[in-house]
């Protein structure tokens, strides 16, 4: 018995913030979740798996484009035609889909909003029971696990659950605990929702497949799906990458000799030395910025330098198989000398201004969207905003110093 566990295809992701890319490249990135899905289906057929589980967020939005619907149907049809079982549940992004009775192919098993169990017997006469449900709304704040039936007499029992481990106060996505899942005695929990692939438990296997295609820099590293096969009564799991583009960071050190041109050269050299099969979308992190001239620093902060780099990478990205879409000027390790900015005042202001509450207040109505709220509540978001403000202030105060110096001459 062999099956594929995938989740969070997020077909039709908008990939916002990449508008500066050449059109052909943007197209390639927009198509990445589609091509990753197609790759998974091809692998399923070639690997002769018995069935495929898709655990929620197949579409990025509640209402899907006709293109995305047609695409998914075509891919599921390929599986059905090959005699591969298909089990689908919908998550917090595509919760409407189940309600709309999206015309999925005949032979595709779609779970409704109540937990139900479907059974199948594989070619090698293994009896498998699969329990799951779809979201009826974008939030599902209660624990659904008690609704899952007791383990039956099937050879293997699998639970499909799009949700997150219970944490603190706000739990919007079918909160559960690992020990609760383990106590069901199911053989495999196929999880969706968290986009980073991960194993919460080895015995029994409680696994996030992760999103099939990383969609922004917080989803860096390899993405794909899990292949699970039985060895006697035991299940073995393997992660298989299917992503078409990968998010990565390139770190470079700069100093007083760094110029626009020398930094472009350094970036190009680093990219040429690390060409990989999978196309990379890169955020460039610079260290040692305290040594840079004020004008260089401001060109890095205001995007002028990146525009210059774009002119070069437009010609080279097909060879380097990479595109730098963002520059992050990392704060220096040494305390920065704020000539015009009282360091103590900054420290105090930083603590009182950049709080999760203030960020939420500034975001206002946007906080009603769970995915925005989740992002803004992350500590990294606050840290990131603080760093950006710090760099802006630093560049500003340096420029003012230089202007003052000019007047003194
Ligand atoms: Mn998702």
Image: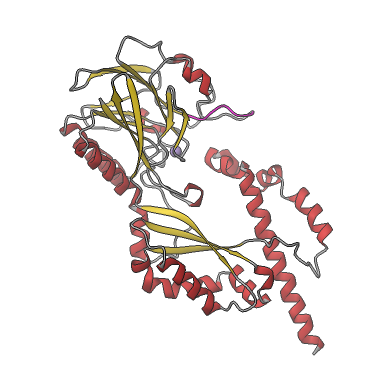
Ligand 1 resides in the quarter of the picture at top left
Q: What x and y, as percent, mark residue 394? A: 72, 67
What is the quadrant of the N terminus in the image?
top left
Q: How many marks?
A: 0
Of residues 154 and 28, the one nearer the viewer is 154
Name the residue at 55% across, 78% down. Answer: 260
Q: What x and y, as percent, mark residue 302? A: 59, 69
**Relative to 71, residue 277 above or below:** below
Magenta stretch, main secondary structure, is loop
Name the residue at 44% across, 58% down. Answer: 281
Q: What x and y, as percent, mark residue 311? A: 43, 75
Name the residue at 68% across, 43% down. Answer: 356
Q: Which residues are magenta?
A: 163-168
**Relative to 98, residue 361 above or below:** below
Image quadrant in which you'd find residue 86: top left
Q: What x and y, as percent, mark residue 191? A: 42, 30
Image quadrant in which you'd find residue 136: top left
Of residues 49 and 214, the one nearer the viewer is 49
């Amino acid at each position: 018995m062999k099956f594929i566990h995938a989740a969070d295809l997020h077909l039709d992701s908008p990939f916002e913030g990449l508008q500066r890319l050449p059109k052909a490249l943007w197209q390639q990135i927009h198509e990445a979740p589609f091509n990753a899905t197609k790759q998974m289906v091809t692998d399923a057929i070639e690997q002769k798996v018995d069935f495929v589980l898709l655990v929620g967020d197949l579409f990025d939005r509640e209402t899907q484009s006709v293109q995305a619907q047609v695409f998914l149907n075509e891919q599921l049809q390929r599986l059905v035609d090959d005699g591969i079982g298909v089990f689908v549940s919908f998550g917090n992004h595509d919760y409407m889909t189940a309600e709309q009775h999206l015309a999925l192919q005949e032979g595709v098993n779609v779970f409704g909003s109540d937990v139900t169990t479907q059974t199948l017997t594989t070619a090698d006469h293994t009896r498998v029971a699969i329990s799951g449900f779809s979201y009826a709304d974008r939030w599902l704040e209660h624990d659904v696990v008690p609704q899952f039936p007791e383990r039956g007499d099937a050879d293997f029992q699998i639970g499909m659950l799009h949700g997150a481990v219970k944490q603190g106060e706000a739990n919007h996505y079918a909160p559960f605990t690992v020990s609760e899942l383990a106590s069901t005695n199911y053989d495999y929990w196929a999880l969706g929702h968290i986009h980073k692939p991960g194993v919460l438990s080895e015995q029994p296997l409680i696994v996030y497949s992760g999103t099939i295609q990383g969609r922004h820099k917080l989803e860096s590293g390899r993405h794909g799906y899990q292949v699970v096969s039985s060895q006697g009564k035991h299940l073995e799991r393997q992660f298989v990458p299917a992503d078409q583009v990968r998010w990565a960071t390139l770190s470079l050190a700069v100093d007083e000799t760094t110029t626009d041109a020398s930094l472009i050269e350094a970036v190009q050299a680093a990219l040429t030395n690390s060409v990989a099969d999978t196309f990379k979308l890169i955020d460039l992190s610079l260290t040692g910025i305290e040594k840079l001239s004020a004008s260089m620093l401001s060109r890095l902060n205001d995007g002028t330098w990146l525009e210059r780099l774009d002119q070069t990478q437009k010609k080279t990205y097909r060879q380097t198989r990479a595109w730098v879409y963002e520059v992050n000027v990392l704060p220096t390790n040494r305390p920065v000398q704020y000539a015009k900015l009282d360091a103590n005042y900054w420290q105090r202001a930083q603590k009182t201004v950049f709080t999760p509450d203030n960020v939420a207040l500034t975001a206002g109505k946007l906080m009603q969207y769970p995915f925005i709220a989740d992002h803004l509540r992350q500590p990294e978001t606050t840290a990131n905003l603080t760093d950006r403000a710090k760099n802006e202030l630093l560049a500003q105060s340096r420029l003012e110093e230089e202007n003052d110096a000019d007047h003194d001459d």
